Structures are given as C-alpha cells and as structure tokens.
Image: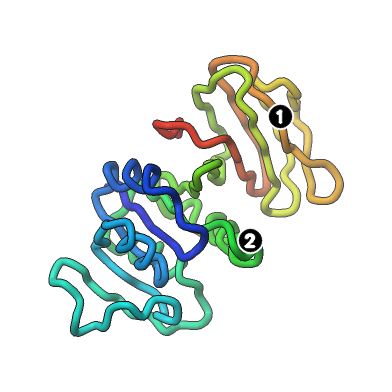
Amino acid sequence: MNFLICCNGRPPSKKLLDKLTAEANVIIAADGGAATLLNAGIRPDFITGDMDSFTGLKGDALPDDITLVSDPDQETNDLEKALKLAKKHGAGRVVICGATGFRIDHTLKNLSVLQQFADAFDSIIIVDDYTACMILPKEFSMDAKPGTPVSLFPISGRVEGITTAGLKYSLTDEFIENGIRDGSSNEAISERITIIYKSGSLLLIIPLEWPLPF
C-alpha cells in the first residue's frame, strides 16, 4: 500500500500535493502537517503527533473519516510517530512531504529519521517541490535522463566501497565522507545509472521529476 505523510515543514505546492495524494492509498498528517493538507482541501485519514503544532481540530470535533492518534512521547518526533503508524497499518511505499524547509535542524532530524526507517518499508522517499531523496539499498539502479544532476551524501558520516555506472564522475570501490570528500553535483550520462556500496548509509538526492523514478 502507498502511504503519504505530510509534515509541518515548508508546505508543498498544491500541484505536488495533488500528484502525491492521487497515488496514495492512505494519508497521514504529522501534527501541523494536518493544517497543510486541510488548507489545500485534502483530508488525511490519520492525524498523529504530540499535537503541539496543530490545534485546529479537537478530538471530539473530528469528522468520522479522520482518526486522531495522539502520541505525547517526547523521545520521538512527529515524523517518527507517523512512520510507526504507517508501519502498523501495512505501508509498503511511503512518500513524505513537508519534511524540509523553514528550520534546518528539523530538516536534518527528518533526514536522520529517513535513515532510521530505511529498512522498514519497501521504499521511503522525501520529496519537496525541487528534489526527491532516499537512502539507497546497497545495490541500486534506476532510469535517468542524461544531464540529470545526481548527488550522493554520506548520511552515516562515511560510506565506503562505492562503485557507480552511468555517472559523469565515476567511482570505483571508493569512499565519500563528510568534511573530507563529498559526492554532490554529479551528473547522469546514460539512461541507466547504478550505484553499489559496501558500508554506511548513502543518501541519493535528485531533482524532482514525475513520475518518481524510484
């Protein structure tokens, strides 16, 4: 099942929200993300979080088709709460919007959560109006248009044993590491790119295209 989670970061455009909701079987609002959805005329199936950001609806005033799942736990953020709920309800593919922008600390936290849940679903992707990103499995291939910017980020700090095919600046059993050697602003040079690595967690960042290539 395809799940959409909307967080309380910079709201995506109505155009993007319409595309995402059209492909979602279940929609979860992470706390203040509920306001983003409702303001766009989209009703989530669930609203979850510690309810410190969204106060527009009271539990006894919720429409019957929206379920409130309050979670006051302060050891997890609202995206973590939403992903746990998605897992509980059988999510296979999860697309997350509203997880970037406004506060860089929240963006970094949400990217950390992406790493935390990378193996919990068939795929888990963060999108905004400009980019799509995901933690790559150890062996990954996708179709691409030549000239497409492709950035690799070692979200675990260091990623080793990286070998690529179809990229302008190729790697052969090499590493990238924060503050030492990065993998930003590479470029696809063929219609198929392949990325393999041995250790660490590797984040792929590409421009948002529709449909999503992964």
Residue at 33% across / 62% down in the picture?
39
Q: Residues within 10 Å of mark 2 (few under 14, many from 20)?
A: some
Q: Horizontal and vertical percent for residue 43?
A: 24, 61
The scheme the figure's colours follow is rainbow
- Between the residue at mark 1 and the residue at mark 2, the CA separation in whole angstroms equals 22 Å
Q: Mark 2 sits on what residue?
A: 108
Q: Horizontal and vertical percent for residue 168?
A: 72, 20
Viewer-closest of 200 and 74: 74
- The C terminus: image quadrant: top left
First along the sequence among labels 1 and 2: 2
Is 14 placed left or right of 117 in the picture? left
Q: Quadrant of residue 36?
A: bottom left
Q: Outermost residue toward the left?
A: 64
Q: Mark 1 sits on what residue?
A: 186
Q: Amino acid at mark 1?
A: Asn
Q: Is residue 30 above or below residue 25?
A: below
Is 44 placed left or right of 104 in the picture? left
Residue at 54% across / 32% down in the picture?
140
Q: Outermost residue toward the right?
A: 180
Element class at badge 2: helix
Residue at 40% across / 44% down in the picture?
16
Element class at badge 1: strand
Q: Is residue 76 above or below residue 130?
A: below
Q: Amino acid at mark 2?
A: Leu
Viewer-closest of 99 and 80: 99
Q: Horizontal and vertical percent for residue 119?
A: 48, 51
Q: Outermost residue toward the top?
A: 190
Is 142 placed left or right of 67 in the picture? right
Residue at 53% across / 27% down in the picture?
141
